[in-house]
Image (spheres, grey):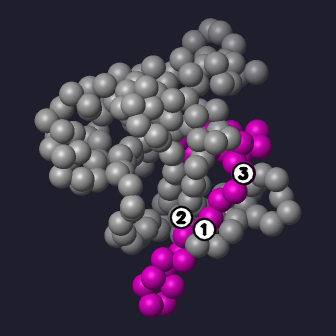
Amino acid sequence: PEVQNGRRRVRGVDDVLEAGTMHRVFEELKRSEEWRKAWNEDEPILTRNHEGVKGWFEMSHLQQAAEEGEIGEAGRGVLDAGGSWQMRRIGHKDDTCVKWEDLDTCLSSSSTVVLNSADARCARLAALSLAAIDSFGLPVCVNVYATGSATKISAPPHTDSQRVLVLRTYG
């Protein structure tokens, strides 16, 4: 097991404890004028460079989740010749989870990895989801966009049918 700060790290349990940081971020955001204005106008909300958000979910977390079988499915987002966003499945249709090697290959090829409803299987993201539900009292779904460093555009501008809170945790 991984050791941090002189003690053994317990996946899942520590993820929930660490989600307390995100809960405090959500509570602070909820009290801000920026949040109230965006919420009332039904605008997307992009967190500032808040210290509690930075590094909360990084590539190392994605790799660990994949290696532990917590990524059920993933898509590769690419722009086609006409500039429209296309999604292609990563891995094989018969696989029960996505392998890190497949995700890493995708990221190395100037693509974006998209994990929809990633909080359904990933302990760390489930803890994040629970912190958001507790803070906002609303249904929450965590989607992850991970983009390779050589990619110029992660995803083209688009709209979602629900309200969106964007947390940039890495990069």
Residue 84 rendering spot, x and y as whole percentages: 45, 82
Is residue 87 visible from the viewing direction of this image? Answer: yes
Q: Residues within 10 Å of mark 2 (few under 14, many from 20)?
A: many
Q: Alpha-carbon distance for marks 1 and 2? A: 6 Å
* Nearer to us in this view, 34 or 110: 34
Q: Is residue 48 above or below residue 157?
A: above
Q: Quadrant of the N terminus?
A: top right
Query: Nearer the observer, disc 3 or disc 1?
Result: 3
Residue 156 magenta: no
Residue 77 magenta: yes
Please give left or right for residue 2 compared with residue 159 in the image: right
Mark 1 lies on residue: 76
Please give left or right for residue 151 compared with residue 100 in the image: left
- Residue 159, by quadrant, is bottom left
Residue occupying the far bottom of the picture: 82
Identity of the amino acid at label 1?
Arg
Q: Which residues are magenta?
A: 58-86
Residue 140 rendering spot, x and y as whole percentages: 47, 41
- Residue 61, by quadrant, is top right
* Nearer to us in this view, 96 or 7: 96
Residue 112 rendering spot, x and y as whole percentages: 53, 64
Marks 3,1: beta carbons within 8 A: no
Identity of the amino acid at label 2?
Thr
Query: Nearer the observer, disc 2 or disc 3?
Result: 3
Mark 2 lies on residue: 112
Residue occupying the far top of the picture: 6
Marks 1,2: beta carbons within 8 A: yes
Q: Alpha-carbon distance for marks 3 and 1? A: 14 Å
Q: Is residue 125 above or below residue 4?
A: below
